[in-house]
Every structure is written in C-alpha cells, then in structure tokens.
Image: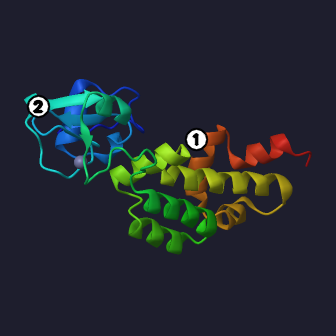
C-alpha cells in the first residue's frame, strides 16, 4: 500500500483511498465513510477486522444512516451504527492527559507516550482528529508557550528557561522557537520587554 503521508486526514478520500482503507482496516478513515458488502447485506467501519470482501461487492456510504436507508444492517463486530465511536479513544485521552500533567518530566513523558502508542500512525491520526495537532506538536507547542512566557516575565538566562520548559537542550529550544516565532528567544525577549 502506498503510505499516505498526509498530515491528518484528507477531507474527501478518493475511491482508491477508501478501497485501501477497507482492505487495510485503517482506523484513520473511521467516521469518514462506511462500506457495505452486497453479498452479506452488512455494513462496517473501515477499521473493521472482519475478513476482506470481494472488491466488486463493496458499496460505499458517507454516513451510517445512508447505509441503513439502502437496506444494509450494521455489523455486530464494529458497530457502525454507534455514532459516538472514536477509535483509540482511551489512548488518545490518556496521551492528552499525560502531556498536560507531565509536560516538564521529559523521561516520564517519553515513556508514557511510548506505552500509550503515541508514535503509532493510527493513534497519532486519532489524536489529531480530536485535538487538532499531533502529540509531538502539542508537546512542543505547550513547552514553547511556557518558555515564551518565561522570557517575558522573568530575567532567567535562556538556557535555564529552555530546561525549565522541558526542552532537552538550548539548541533544541532555539530550533523549535525559531520555527514557531520566526525569531530567536533573545530577540523575542528584547522586542517584547522594555529591558
Ligand atoms: Zn464490521
């Protein structure tokens, strides 16, 4: 399968995307469309682990209601009729909580991210759907905003601010800061304070 490196999900998956999604049981497409199997009269979420149908028997629907109106019954396994279904809901919420509570404890956060699957594509994708950014981007964003605040409200040296905000080094901090603020931490401090 050609790996889809889109950030997040495409708004309208193409027919090929949908087929690939179904054949790979890709949870990234859950909620975007449903597929029905003409030979069984049952419809599923893309991530359903039931055995792959013959391609010529697949029928796509945008919503669960559409599939049901067309006469298909919801699969008992993936329950495409439950609208609140969110893939990886528990992982995604646990990742978010870990970021919020352990932002400054690098080692602990890294270990938790790994344990919760924060580096796995489907989980990253579900996280982004829910919170608008990837876990790693959210971590950086939170640390940067802490650091920016520190630059403006304290006179601490920049290295200290970097470490206090959870960055592993001054250079990692500079790189991330420049990418977001398009200036260096020192200039940012000068430009935004009267000192
Ligand atoms: Zn199913």
> With respect to residue 67, does 112 lie above or below?
below
> With respect to residue 154, does 29 lie above or below?
above
Q: 10 Å neighbourhood of mark 2: few (<14), some, or many (≥20)?
A: few
When asked about the image quadrant of residue 113, the answer is: bottom left
**Percent coordinates x, y for residue 120 in the rendering:** 34, 56
**Percent coordinates x, y for residue 144 in the rendering:** 65, 52
The answer to whether residue 99 is left or right of residue 31 is right
| Residue plotted at (71% across, 62% down) | 161
The answer to whether residue 111 is left or right of residue 104 is left
Question: Circle 2 — which element?
Answer: helix
> With respect to residue 58, does 143 lie above or below?
below
- The residue positioned farthest toward the right in the image shown: 194
The answer to whether residue 102 is left or right of residue 95 is right
* Residue at the spot of label 1: 179
Question: Circle 1 — which element?
Answer: helix
| Residue plotted at (51% across, 60% down) | 93
* Residue at the spot of label 2: 57
Sequence-first disc among 2 and 1: 2
Q: Nearer the viewer, residue 174 or 89?
A: 89
Find the distance from the CA under tag 2 to the CA under tag 1: 48 Å
| Residue plotted at (62% across, 41% down) | 180
């Amino acid at each position: 399968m050609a790996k889809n490196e889109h950030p997040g999900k495409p708004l309208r998956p193409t027919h090929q995307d949908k087929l690939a999604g179904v054949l790979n049981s890709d949870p990234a497409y859950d909620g975007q469309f449903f597929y029905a199997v003409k030979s069984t009269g049952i419809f599923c979420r893309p991530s359903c682990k039931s055995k792959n149908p013959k391609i010529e028997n697949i029928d796509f629907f945008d919503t669960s209601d559409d599939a049901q109106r067309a006469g298909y019954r919801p699969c008992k396994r993936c329950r495409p009729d439950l609208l609140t279904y969110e893939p990886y809901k528990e992982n995604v919420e646990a990742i978010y909580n870990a970021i919020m509570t352990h932002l400054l404890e690098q080692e602990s956060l890294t270990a938790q991210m790994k344990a919760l699957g924060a580096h796995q594509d489907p989980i990253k994708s579900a996280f982004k759907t829910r919170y608008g950014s990837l876990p790693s981007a959210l971590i950086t964003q939170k640390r940067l905003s802490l650091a920016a605040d520190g630059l403006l409200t304290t006179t601490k040296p920049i290295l200290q601010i970097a470490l206090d905000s959870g960055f592993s080094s001054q250079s990692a901090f500079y790189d991330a800061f420049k990418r977001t603020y398009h200036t260096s931490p020192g200039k940012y401090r000068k430009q935004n304070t009267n000192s």
